[in-house]
Image (cartoon, rainbow, N blue to C red):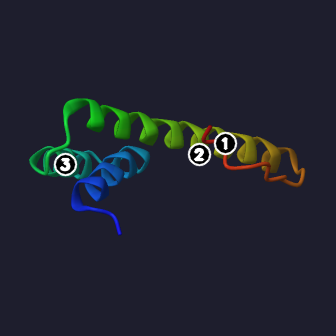
Amino acid sequence: MLDEKTKELIAVGASIAANCQSCLEYHAAEASRLGACDQDIAVAAAMGRLVQRGAQGKMEQLAATLLKGESAEAAGCGCS
């Protein structure tokens, strides 16, 4: 079972990946309130940005493939 601080750090990353400013503000404050240091929050944010960039890249590849009329091949999620 995850503790509340860890859940909030996950939510920080998810908020960035989802492009939700109000969620990021809330979850970063909650993580801090629960004892997460600035570095913990920064690491969670960095992971969210990695997921966001990976998803964006895969979407761009899919859009390019579909616009060319080709079939799309999934080769991982592209987050790393």
Q: Nearer the viewer, mark 1 or mark 3?
A: 3
Which residue sits at x=38%, y=46%?
13
Q: Amino acid at mark 1?
A: Gly
Q: Are marks 1 and 2 in contact (CB under 8 Å)?
A: yes
Position of the C terminus by quadrant: top right
Question: Where residue 12 appears, x then y in whole percent?
Answer: 31, 47
User: In this picture, is 17 found above or below 37?
Assistant: below
Decide which of 77, 35 is in the foreground and name it: 35
Tag of residue 67? none
Decide which of 10, 57 is in the foreground and name it: 10
Q: Which residue is mark 1?
A: 78
Q: Which residue is mark 2?
A: 55
Decide which of 74, 38 is in the foreground and name it: 38
> Which image quadrant for residue 5?
bottom left
Question: Where residue 30 appears, x then y in whole percent?
Answer: 15, 52
- Mark-to-mark CA distance, 1 and 3: 27 Å
Question: Where residue 57 appears, x then y in whole percent?
Answer: 64, 38
Provide the secondary structure element on which disc 3 rests: helix
Q: Nearer the viewer, mark 2 or mark 3?
A: 3
Question: Where residue 68 appears, x then y in whole percent?
Answer: 86, 44
Q: Which residue is mark 3?
A: 31
Which residue sits at x=60%, y=41%?
79
Mark sitting earlier along the chain (2/3):
3
Provide the secondary structure element on which disc 1 rests: loop
